[in-house]
Image: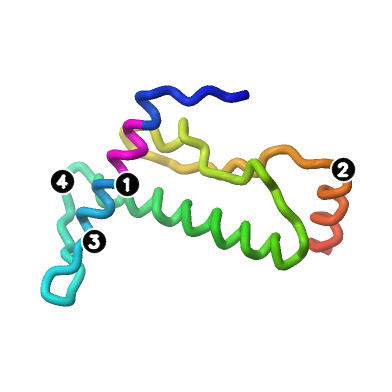
Amino acid sequence: MRMRSVKSADRWGRVKEEHARAHVPAQGRPHVHTPPDGRRDSAHRVEEAEETVQDLRTALARAGITLPSLRIDLASVARDTPRPLIVLGGCSVEVAARLAAALR
């Protein structure tokens, strides 16, 4: 079992909060504030990774495939400049065979 550090989880929460604050609607338009240190870009990267994980999970489900460990690697976003990595995780031989068939 993989342990997540409190520091990583805390940073992950801060990135998500910063992203939410950057996208609060103001008079029907999104508020666009670009901090000088690129935090908005970092939050966008994390949001894009979350959307990609969800899209991949949905596409795999349509093919009858479930990867239970599919997630964003927290260590990859717990840096000053997050570069999210998506963890596909392990799967059974049967699931791997179905995945290979779906990709053919």
- In the displayed image of the protein, which residue is found farthest to the bottom? 28
Tell me the CA gap for discs 1 and 3: 11 Å
Mark 1 or mark 2: whose residue is earlier in sequence: 1
Q: Which residue is mark 1?
A: 16
Q: In this rendering, is residue 1 above or below 88?
A: above
Mark 2, other Cα within 10 Å: few <14 / some 14–19 / many ≥20: few
Q: Which residue is mark 4?
A: 36
Mark 1, other Cα within 10 Å: few <14 / some 14–19 / many ≥20: some
Tell me the CA gap for discs 2 and 3: 42 Å
Q: Which residue is mark 3?
A: 23
Tell me the CA gap for discs 4 and 1: 18 Å
Which portion, as a residue range, is magenta? 10-15
Tell me the CA gap for discs 2 and 4: 48 Å
x then y, percent, for residue 39: 25, 45
* Three-letter code for the amino acid on which mark 1 is drawn: Lys
User: Which secondary structure lies at badge 2?
Assistant: helix
Residue in view at x 83 percent, y 41 percent: 92
Q: Which residue is mark 2?
A: 93
The reply to whether the C-beta atoms of the residues labelled 2 and 4 are less than 8 Å apart is no
Mark 3, other Cα within 10 Å: few <14 / some 14–19 / many ≥20: some
Determine if the magenta segment contains residue 12: yes
Tally the numbered discs: 4
Mark 2 or mark 4: whose residue is earlier in sequence: 4
Mark 4 or mark 1: whose residue is earlier in sequence: 1
x then y, percent, for residue 13: 33, 39
